[in-house]
């Protein structure tokens, strides 16, 4: 039977409180933005016309209801979203650092997203998907780790392309050794990897990206590896083929929340368009160019999930740079 969902993702859905100014008293003001990497990815894919579904848990509270409404508005199926009556929705405070990077403070002890159980995973949403996407925030605690493993097993049994983004957030782990083990598990169970510059340096212990990528290629069987390098651009590695595309830098950039998720979503858009078996240099350059441009646009907007660019906006930016 043909699969009816392009991408199903499992993981965290939370509120990102992003600093949006200061009060007359000099106190920071924060805006409650819908967030969470997996749904950011799905929101961009939905904007590009793909059918998407989310599996996860939020609190049965005002923030949880806000999140459910927000992803439904973006065209993401909420059939796999569970509302927890006992544990509140996870919150994250995002502070912008002087260098433009971000510092995260999480209110998640516990948080609803980490409370998802294996028996609550809607396996049909995975079995009917072309791609299953996951990260490591659904591996930080035993119960939700079991749910993630069950989902991955279903994805593998049904022939899904498996997509993995480590999305390392050190404050959420009991130790970085535990985080390293979870990333290792994800790398053993993916066909498409999106990894950032700081993540590959941390995981491999190599400052040189090429040395780090070589370790991944020699240790894991990952057909497509994409490396995001912030303002430098991105690279893709597909067997012996390597391409690099520069970033689309903009003076209007205000913050980078969701840029990596937007990039990763556009990589999956390319996989859905071209398939994973016959990629070449020209296709990889096309995928990275589109992904870099889309990520650049998101950096000019506050939040991520609700402000993803359209395909027309992305192509317009690409056209301006040619």
Image: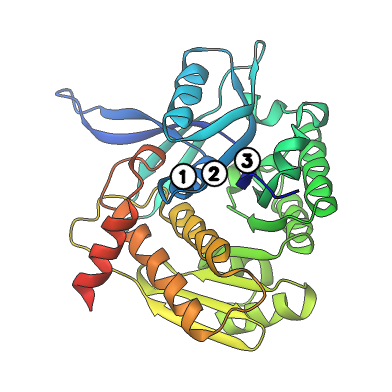
Residue 303 is situated, as x and y percent measured from the top left of the image, at 35, 40
Residue on which disc 3 sits = 172
Residue 45 drawn above or below residue 215: above
From the image, state whether disc 3 or disc 1 is nearer to you. 1
Total number of numbered discs in the rendering: 3
CB atoms of marks 3 and 1 within 8 Å: no
Mark closer to the chain start, 3 or 1: 1
User: For this rendering, which residue is in front, 98 or 72?
Assistant: 72
**Mark number for residue 32?**
none
Q: In the rendered image, which residue does mark 1 sit on?
A: 46
Residue 187 left/right relative to 225: right
Residue found at x 47% / y 83%: 282
Q: Is residue 108 visible?
A: no
**Residue visible at 41% across and 46% down in the picture:** 47
What is the quadrant of residue 31 in the picture? Answer: top left
Residue position for label 2? 51
Q: Secondary structure at mark 1?
A: helix
Assign a secondary structure to mark 2: loop
- Between the residue at mark 1 and the residue at mark 2, the CA separation in whole angstroms equals 6 Å
């Amino acid at each position: 039977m043909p699969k009816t969902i392009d991408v199903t993702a499992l993981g965290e859905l939370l509120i990102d409180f992003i600093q949006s100014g200061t009060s007359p008293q000099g106190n920071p003001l924060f805006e409650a933005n819908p967030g969470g990497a997996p749904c950011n990815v799905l929101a961009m894919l939905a904007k590009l016309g793909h059918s998407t579904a989310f599996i996860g848990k939020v609190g049965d509270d005002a923030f949880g209801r806000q999140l459910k409404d927000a992803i439904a508005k973006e065209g993401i199926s909420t059939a796999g979203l569970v509302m927890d009556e006992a544990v509140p929705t996870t919150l994250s405070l995002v502070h912008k650092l002087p260098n433009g990077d971000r510092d995260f403070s999480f209110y998640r002890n516990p948080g609803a997203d980490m409370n998802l159980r294996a028996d609550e995973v809607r396996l049909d949403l995975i079995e009917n998907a072309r791609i299953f996407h996951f990260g490591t925030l659904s591996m930080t605690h035993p119960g939700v780790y079991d749910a993630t493993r069950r989902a991955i097993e279903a994805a593998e049994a049904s022939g899904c392309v498996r997509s993995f983004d480590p999305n390392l957030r050190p404050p959420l782990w009991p130790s970085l050794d535990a985080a390293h083990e979870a990333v290792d598990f994800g790398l053993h169970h993916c066909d498409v990897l999106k990894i950032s510059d700081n993540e590959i340096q941390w995981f491999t212990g190599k400052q040189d990206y090429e040395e780090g990528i070589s370790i991944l290629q020699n240790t894991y069987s990952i057909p497509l590896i994409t490396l995001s390098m912030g303002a430098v651009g991105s690279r893709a590695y597909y067997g012996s083929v390597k391409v690099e595309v520069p970033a689309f830098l903009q003076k209007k950039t205000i913050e980078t929340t969701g840029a990596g998720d937007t990039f990763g979503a556009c990589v999956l858009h390319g996989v859905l368009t071209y398939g994973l078996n016959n990629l070449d240099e020209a296709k990889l350059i096309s995928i990275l160019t589109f992904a870099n441009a889309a990520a650049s646009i998101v950096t000019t907007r506050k939040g991520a999930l609700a402000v993803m660019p359209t395909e027309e906006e992305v192509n317009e930016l690409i056209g301006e740079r040619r």
